[in-house]
């Protein structure tokens, strides 16, 4: 496939790629706890800087489930469970 990709129809290459992504997600984000999630901390006033420094060098680890912990202006961890909402807030800010 890598050497003669033009011999495989585009729709078939897309299907193969989607299958690779699905299998990788099953492995890296398994619900059985076999792969620990990647947890990182960001300060509210420095979301971009902290996010970039926390995630910028993680490479393949970014395929794992990600959880963000926010630190407020007083330097204290905010209470809350990241069930997706906190990460979405991080990602959209």
Image: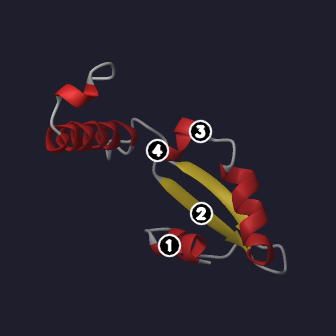
CA distance for labels 1 and 4: 16 Å
Residue at screen point 33% across, 43% down = 25
Q: Is residue 22 above or below residue 40?
A: above
Q: Earlier in the sequence, mark 1 or mark 3?
A: 3
For residue 68, the mark is: 2
Left or right of 2: which side holds 69?
A: right
Q: Residues within 10 Å of mark 2 (few under 14, many from 20)?
A: many
Q: SS class of the residue under badge 2?
A: strand
Q: Are marks 2 and 3 in contact (CB under 8 Å)?
A: no
Q: SS class of the residue under badge 3?
A: helix
Q: Write down the residue under mark 1.
A: 88
Residue 43: percent from left, percent from top = 76, 70
Q: Write down the residue under mark 4.
A: 63
The N terminus - image quarter: top left
Residue at screen point 74% across, 76% down = 44
Residue 58: percent from left, percent from top = 63, 41
Q: Earlier in the sequence, mark 1 or mark 2?
A: 2
Residue at screen point 27% across, 28% down = 5
In the current view of this chain or complex, which residue is farthest to the top? 3
CA distance for labels 1 and 2: 9 Å
* Residue depth check, mark 2 versus mark 4: number of the one nearer the observer: 4
Q: SS class of the residue under badge 4?
A: helix
Q: Are marks 1 and 3 in contact (CB under 8 Å)?
A: no
Residue 39: percent from left, percent from top = 59, 53
For residue 59, the mark is: 3
The C terminus - image quarter: bottom right
């Amino acid at each position: 496939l890598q050497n003669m990709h033009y011999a495989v129809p585009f729709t078939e290459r897309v299907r193969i790629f989607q299958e690779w992504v699905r299998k990788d997600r099953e492995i890296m984000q398994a619900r059985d706890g076999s792969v620990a999630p990647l947890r990182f901390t960001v300060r509210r006033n420095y979301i971009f800087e902290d996010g970039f420094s926390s995630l910028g060098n993680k490479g393949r680890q970014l395929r794992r489930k990600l959880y963000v912990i926010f630190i407020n202006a007083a330097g204290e961890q905010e209470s809350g469970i990241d069930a997706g909402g906190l990460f979405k807030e991080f990602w959209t800010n």
